Structures are given as structure tokens and as C-alpha cells.
Amino acid sequence: MSALLEVDGVTVTLPVAGMQQPVLRDISFTLGQGEALGLVGESGSGKSMTARAIGRLLPPGAQCEGRISFDGDDVLAFDRNALRRYRTNGVAMIFQDPRASINPVRRVGDFLTEALCTNGGLKQDVANDRAADLLDAVGIDDPRRRMRQYPHQLSGGMLQRVMIAAALLIDPRLILADEPTTALDVTTQAEVMAILDTLRRERGVSMLFITHDLELAAAVCDRTAVMYAGSLVEEQRSLNLDSDPLHPYTAALVQARPDITFTHDRLLAIPGRPLSAFEAPAGCAFGPRCPHSEPACAEAVPPLLTVDTGRSRCRRLPQLRGTMGQKSAEWL
Amino acid sequence: MTLGRFLLGRLIALVVTLLLASLAVYGALYLAPGTPISFLTRGRTVTPEELAAIKARYFLDEGFLSQYGHWIAGVLHGDFGTSIIGKAPVLSLLGGRALNTFMLVAFASIIILVIGLTVGITAGLKRGWLDRTLMVGATGAMAIPAFVAAIVLVLIFAVNLRWFPVFGAGDSLSDRLYHLVLPGVALALASVAYVARLTRAAVRTEADSDHVQTAVSRGLPRGAVISRHVLRNAMIPIVTVAGLTIGSLIAGAVVIEQVFQLNGLGSYLVQAVGQKDFPVVQAIVLILVAVFIVLNTVVDVLYAVLDPRISAGRQAA
């Protein structure tokens, strides 16, 4: 089966102070039909930029190299019409903050049906019926009344459900979900996530799920990719991230996470601070913060190694494999 | 339902503000140097009989509030009193002049809305040299006071090029409009620039906002994104500022009418103040203040119509 989405060697640069600075370096991954891929990493590691590159929503002045193919078509080469078709029923985006991402002065119903009526040429009442059905499916009571209301009359959790419904309404083949639950409280987060996950699976929609939350990514995604300083450092089955991390950065992230079964005096933190892609040193970007780095790590950017369960950008992986997963005994 | 209550509230506020403003306008007379008697007698020595007649006519023996009461009751019946200088009902003296001022302000408003919005929207949507050029021009124009603009325009277009008349109001409608070109442009210039800059800022803010990005990500045509999301939302601050700017033109018209010898309310006000013709001063100031307050209320109401978050209140689930 060929993949629905193929991202191959994508490098993005943005103009900063008159210079094109890299924000993404050589990103490659694939996503099959109906599959979900988690994209995790610290703020500024390039997760959102990756989704924007796929949705062709990069800021003005950005330059994107490499190849992104969607169902065999070259996304970066789309002209205006092809791009509209791609957005009309190919890809839908769910953004982090529903309150900012939904026009506050238009009714919820207008927001939901706008794409259907404008792009899909549906009649308003047909679109209204479909929107109401989907609102019902995402767990909103009395959908007709909600559709007549304005966004400020709905809670954050409800608005994010509206956003999810709007994304699903166009019957997309791929959803790009950019931290869809970050702006919500924890209980609402779980509900909204469950709804998104269920509806996505039912409809066989693929999803690129961006989050800070390793566990959430593992819960809803088959595979998880970890980003650091604009590079993809590791990608493998979500289930193995904890027990068998393939990159020292992932191992450090896993260890830095609080664990509800133990009481820690102090949480483990990764020394140093996260770097932007354009600050990254020559060689391995994580090198300066890595407990396992050696002089050779700083010489050249390590290639993406393919191993049995996934891919990693650590050149020492063969020696380190199996030793990075355990938490240091002194903290137990 | 909530919009109705909002409108009722605005209406009550409007009436209260108008009453307070009228009190201030009437009271201002007593803050001016000299007594009402000295205004009315114009410094002449008058016989005690004449003095008593004047006092009786203007209720000067009664308290301030009572005097105000007589005046405002007259105003509400359309009687602004009699001009001390013109010896005629104030209202009859104002009619034609009010029309001149109205035409000037309306002409300037149209210039402000058409050119200000066009320039602002163009600059807001097109990034690059056009945007920068327009905004540099607007910043320059904003710094030019109306009286300077008026004199420079007269010098270039009336005296040197002889395209437009130097002063006067004109006779027929087309002649009047022709006479209004230079005064209208002079009055509008700084406001055009201000509205253009604000429009650009509002359009740019909306164009860069998250909800517009959402609209783009849904593959809506550019025209729909601009009209339904960028301009629709940018209208909210634009209406506010454009409305208040037009209100402030009423004050700016005083200067322009003087420069161009347009016989309007503004120049009449200056003349009446000089002659201490206080019934006329009170009437004109009250009219100008009332127009300004009514315009403000219209802006408030429009704001609520444009932005559902203002009037709908809290009904969150």
C-alpha cells in the first residue's frame, strides 16, 4: 500500500533579520491511509511548522525545499486551483486555540457550513443538516440552537468540538491536528481527544497529531515521531517509546516526565535549554545537551538510521540501544 | 431581545447626555466675563425701565435653573430665542447656514470614507512598496493642520492654477459642489490619512489573525476570505474611528468656513461670539454638541450590530 502522505527531505527557511534561517531540516516521514502519526517535541522544535508546510500555510517569505506528496500529487507544486481542491476535501486542520481560530463575529453554524457551501456547492439547509448531525456526533446537545449562537457563547471544550466537527464535515483524507487539546483543561482534553480519535478511526481518516504530551500521542497514534531543533530525531511505534527509546533526546524526555506511581524529590530535567533550528550546532543538534555525546557527534549531522522498529538520528544508537530506557536507579 | 435592551439603554443615555450638555452650554454663558446684562445692553447706559424690560424678557430676576428651564422649554419647541444683533428668531438665522455646514461636512465625510477606506484596505492587503508608499503619504498628510492645508490648496489650485474658486458657497447645486471641492479636501485631508492608517492596521491585524488562517486552510476563495473574514471583522474598529472622526469634522468646519468664507454655522459661531450674541452662540453650540452626541450613539449602536460580543452579553453554556 502506498502512503497517503509522503514527506521527503523537507527543509524550510524563514527570513529573520534579512537572512533565510532554517526552521526545519531534512524532515522525512510517511503516513498511510487511516494511520495516525504523533509528532512530539518541545516548543520551537518545528512541529507546527511541519504541519504548516504540509497544509501549505507557511508564513510569507518562507522557502520550502524537498517533496511533500499527497496521494501521489506534489503538494509544493500545487497551483491555486489544485491547492483549493486539496484543502476542499483532502486535508483539514484543527488548531490549538479554538477561540482564536474561529471567527468571533460569525455564527457557529456559518463557521461549520461555510466550506461546504462555498467549496462544495451544497445548499444551505443540506449543509445545516449535515453540520447538526456531526455536532451531535461530537457530543454537543441541541446542535440547532448552538449553530445559531456565536462562538463566545460556547465553552472552550465545546468550541474545539465544533472545530473537530468542521474538520470532519468536509470528509477529509488527512487531518492535521496542531495541539488540539492544549488550550483545554485536562478533563475536557480527554473527552475531546476521545471523540477525535473515535470519529477519525470510524471514517478511516489519517491524522498527523502534534502534541507536547508523549502519553497522549502514544494513546491515539500508531507511531510517534520526535522532533528536536527542527529535525526529526526518532520515529517508531508509540508503544516502544518508553521502553526502547531510539534517541538520547527521547530517553531524556521520557525520564523528565513526572510519574504518578513514585514521589520524586525533584524531576529530572535535560541540562541546557532547547535550541531553535538555526541555533543548532554543526553535527548532532542535541549533542551539547546529550549525556552520551562524544567528539565525533559534532562532526557531521547524523543520518537517519533505519533499525528494526523505527528510525533514529543518533549515530551511537548501536552502542546505546537498550541502555537509555531505564530511569536512573538513584531517583527511585 | 438583548439588542433591544441595549438600544433602549443607549437611547436613555443619549437623552441624559443631551440634557447635561444643554445645561453646560447654557451655564457657559455665566462663566464668560461680564454679566448677561452687560451683553444685552452692549455696555450702553440704559434707563431703569429698559433694564427692567430686558430682565423680564430674559427672566434675569429668576434663579439660574429657572432661566435654564425657560430656555430649554423654548428649545424643545423649536424656539432658540431672538438674536440680539440680528433682531430675528435664531432659528431663521441658522437655517441656510446649517445647510452650508452640513454640505461641507457631508462632502468631507464622503472623501474620508471613499479615499480613506480604499487606501487603507489596499495598503492592508498588499504588502510591499505600495503599502509603504501609501503609509508614508498618509503619515505626512496627517501632520498637516486643516488651516495650513486650506491655504496651500487655495494658493495652488485657486490662485495659481485657477481650477477652483478662492472662496464663496456658490448658487446652484452643481456650483455649490464645485465651490466645496477645496474646502472639503482641506477639511478631510488629515482625517483621510488617519482613517487610512487605522483601516490598514485593522485589516492587517485581521489578515494575520488565527481565524483568517483557519479560513485559508479550508480552501475558501481569496475573495470570500477577505470579504467575510478580514473586512467583516476589521469593520468594527473602522466604524468606530470613522464615526468619531466625522463627528470631529464639525469642529474643524469652523476654521475651514472662515478661510473659505463659507457662510456656515462655524463662521457664524465665531462671528456671534465676537459680537456676544449669546442666543445664537448657545443655539449653535447646542446643535453642534447634539450632532456630535447623536453621531456617537449611532457609532455605539453600529458597533453592537457589527460585534455580537458587545450586545449579547453573557449567555455562555
Image: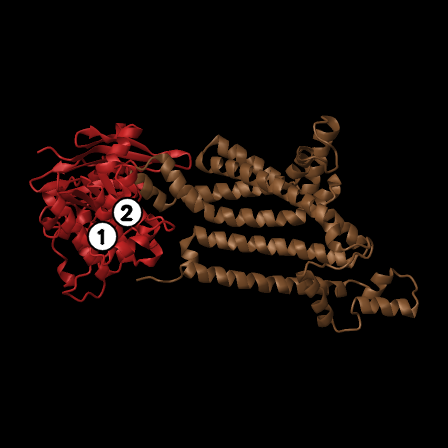
Chain colours: A red, B brown
Does residue B30 appear left or right of residue A76 in this picture? Answer: right
Picture coordinates of residue A262, whole percent (x, y): 15, 65
Q: Which mark is residue B261?
A: none
- Amino acid type indicated by mark 2: Leu
Label 2 SS: helix
Do tags 1 and 2 sit on the same chain? Answer: yes
- Corner quadrant of residue B212: top left
Residue drawn at (54%, 48%) of the image: B241
Q: Disc 1 or 2, which lies upstream in sequence?
A: 2
Picture coordinates of residue B7, whole percent (x, y): 48, 59
Q: Disc 2: which chain?
A: A
Picture coordinates of residue A147, whole percent (x, y): 29, 52
Residue drawn at (76%, 66%) of the image: B30
Q: Is residue B90 above or below residue B152?
A: below
Nearest the eye: A79 or A152? A152
- Residue A183 visible from this viewpoint: no
- Do the residues bearing badges 1 and 2 touch, measured as CB atoms within 8 Å? yes
Q: Disc 1: which chain?
A: A
- Amino acid type indicated by mark 1: Leu
Mark 1, residue position:
A135
Nearest the eye: A167 or B307? B307
Does residue B253 appear left or right of residue A71 in this picture? Answer: right
Does residue B112 appear left or right of residue A235 in this picture? Answer: right
Picture coordinates of residue B134, whole percent (x, y): 53, 34
Which quarter of the figure is the N terminus of chain B placed in?
A: bottom left
Residue drawn at (54%, 46%) of the image: B242
Which quarter of the figure is the C terminus of chain B placed in?
A: bottom left
Outermost left residue: A308
Mark 2, residue position:
A112
Label 1 SS: helix
Give the Cα distance between marks 1 and 2.
9 Å
